[in-house]
């Protein structure tokens, strides 16, 4: 199975290792869609023949399930073709999210087929019909399971290679087809050996598998459309890439926008010493942006934050405030810490990063921390902004 997948990739995809290139992704999508159309149409025709021979509603339903899979493969092919279109004035970030929409359409097709199959199966439970056992039909179903198992592994391999939710959804659908066809085969074998007609019951079981796969697929494709958080691995990779530069002391306010596979926008704040040469620091930031763009196939924007690192009083206040914040909640962090000295008092200005669930009491958090600081130091006042991290907080290098 693995050899066949590798052979197809070598034959039909040029520059197959450039997986972040939209054109290469498009080629993978076309290959997946073409293989799906061919295999599912053939399976549908053979199962229709087997269903007509035996009179089994479960086999007929399984045949039409393959037909819906063929239609889904057409959607996959069209989706990748449209997703590969370049940016235009109306869509400055490209058309990559069409790939997610095609995955959602596949999920809808799976759910529709599942409901129709459940309805017809219930009717057969109430009003069973005579079946005819056929060894040829058994052979057709057995071969169908093997083909679907290969298709599942084929699409899973391609989906993992280019990180495509659409292909992963197709792989899950093919795997559920293996289970459903296996149930149909088991029902036919039971009828052939015992004479018991459980065609309707088997059809209902198949329908439940199909519906479960449909709901799971819909969930996986809706999440990126709604704006799901980036993976912790991606966030950590971005963080480590930025922090690997000696002049960067900390990273915060990182945001990752997903406009489709291979179309990310990354923005973040990079902390540098206030004593750094401004031109050299700016050149370093430019180099980091280019490194991020090349490594993660994205458009990155970095804001440079100068911070004081050699003021003993400021460092003492920062450590004390960090302790206060951690005592309120160990998950919270601070950044952008500054101190403004006046003739009569000192202002400590900083941001507190909390979890999204805590944002509804941001005012309360601000008051609690501010009151605690003022109680410890009568001439010190806190100017606090409470916010939450879109991707998780980053630690700082020790000054």
Image (spheres, helix red, strand yellow):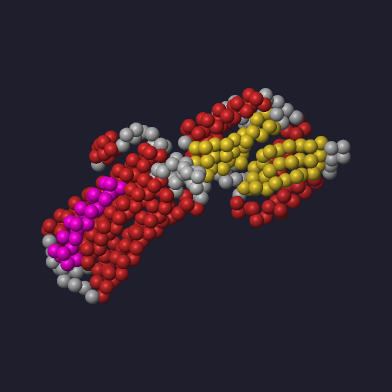
In depth, the one of 318 and 140 nearer the eye is 140
The reply, left or right, for residue 13 in relation to residue 279 is left
The residue under the point 49% across, 46% down is 91
Write down the quadrant of residue 7 in the picture. Answer: top left
The x, y position of residue 67, in whole percent, is 26, 57
Q: From which residue to which does the magenta span run? A: 33-56
Q: Give the residue at x 74% y 41%.
A: 349
- Residue at 20 percent across and 53 percent down: it is 42
Front-most of residues 322 and 80: 80
| Dominant secondary structure, magenta | helix
Looking at the image, the residue that sits furthest to the bottom is 127
Residue at image point 67% right, 39% down: 335
Query: Which residue ends up furthest to the front in the rendered image?
Result: 89
> Can the viewer see residue 258 in this picture?
no
Residue 121 in sight in this render: yes
Task: From the viewer's side, name the closer residue of 333 and 137.
Answer: 137
Counting from the top left corner in percent of width and height, residue 328 is at 68, 48
For the N terminus, the quadrant is top left
Q: Compared to 392, does 195 lie above or below?
A: below
Q: Is residue 378 magenta?
A: no
Q: Is residue 13 above or below residue 220?
A: above
**Which percent across, then down, holds residue 219?**
43, 55
Reply above or below: 250 against 203: above
**Residue 305 locus on image (x, y percent):** 66, 34
What is the total number of numbered labels drawn onto the structure image? 0
Please name whichever residue, 327 or 56, is drawn nearer the observer in this view of the structure. Answer: 56
Q: Which quarter shows the C terminus? A: top right
- Judge left or right: residue 154 versus residue 367: left
């Amino acid at each position: 199975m693995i050899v066949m997948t590798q052979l197809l990739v070598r034959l039909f995809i040029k520059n197959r290792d450039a997986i972040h290139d939209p054109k290469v992704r498009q080629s993978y999508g076309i290959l997946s869609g073409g293989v799906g159309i061919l295999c599912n149409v053939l399976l549908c025709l053979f199962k229709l023949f087997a269903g007509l021979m035996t009179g089994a509603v479960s086999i007929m339903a399984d045949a039409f399930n393959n037909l819906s899979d063929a239609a889904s493969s057409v959607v996959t092919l069209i989706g990748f073709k449209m997703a590969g279109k370049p940016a235009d004035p109306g869509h400055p970030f490209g058309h990559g999210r069409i790939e997610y929409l095609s995955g959602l359409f596949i999920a809808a097709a799976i759910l529709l087929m599942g409901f129709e199959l459940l309805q017809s199966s219930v009717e057969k439970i109430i009003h069973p019909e005579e079946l005819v056992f056929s060894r040829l039909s058994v052979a057709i179903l057995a071969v169908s399971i093997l083909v679907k198992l290969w298709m599942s592994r084929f699409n899973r391999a391609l989906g993992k290679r280019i990180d495509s939710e659409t292909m992963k959804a197709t792989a899950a659908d093919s795997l559920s087809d293996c289970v459903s066809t296996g149930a149909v085969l088991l029902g036919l074998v039971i009828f052939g050996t015992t004479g018991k007609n459980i065609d309707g019951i088997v059809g209902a079981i198949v329908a439940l598998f199909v519906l479960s796969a449909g709901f799971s697929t819909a969930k996986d494709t809706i999440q990126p459309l709604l704006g799901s958080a980036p993976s912790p691995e991606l966030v950590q990779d971005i963080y480590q890439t930025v922090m690997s530069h000696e002049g960067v002391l900390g990273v915060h306010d990182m945001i990752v926008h997903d406009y489709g596979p291979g179309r990310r926008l990354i923005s973040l704040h990079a902390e540098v010493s206030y004593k750094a040469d401004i031109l050299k620091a700016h050149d370093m930031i430019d180099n980091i942006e280019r490194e991020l763009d090349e490594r993660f196939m994205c458009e990155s924007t970095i804001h440079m934050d100068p911070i004081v690192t050699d003021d003993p009083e400021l460092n003492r206040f920062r450590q004390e405030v960090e302790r206060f914040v951690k005592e309120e909640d160990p998950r919270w962090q601070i950044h952008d810490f500054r101190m403004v000295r006046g003739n009569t008092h000192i202002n400590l200005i900083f941001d507190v990063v909390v979890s999204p669930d805590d944002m509804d009491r941001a005012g309360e958090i601000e008051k609690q921390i501010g009151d605690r600081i003022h109680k410890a130091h009568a001439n010190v006042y806190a100017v606090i902004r409470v916010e939450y991290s879109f991707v998780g907080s980053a630690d700082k290098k020790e000054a």
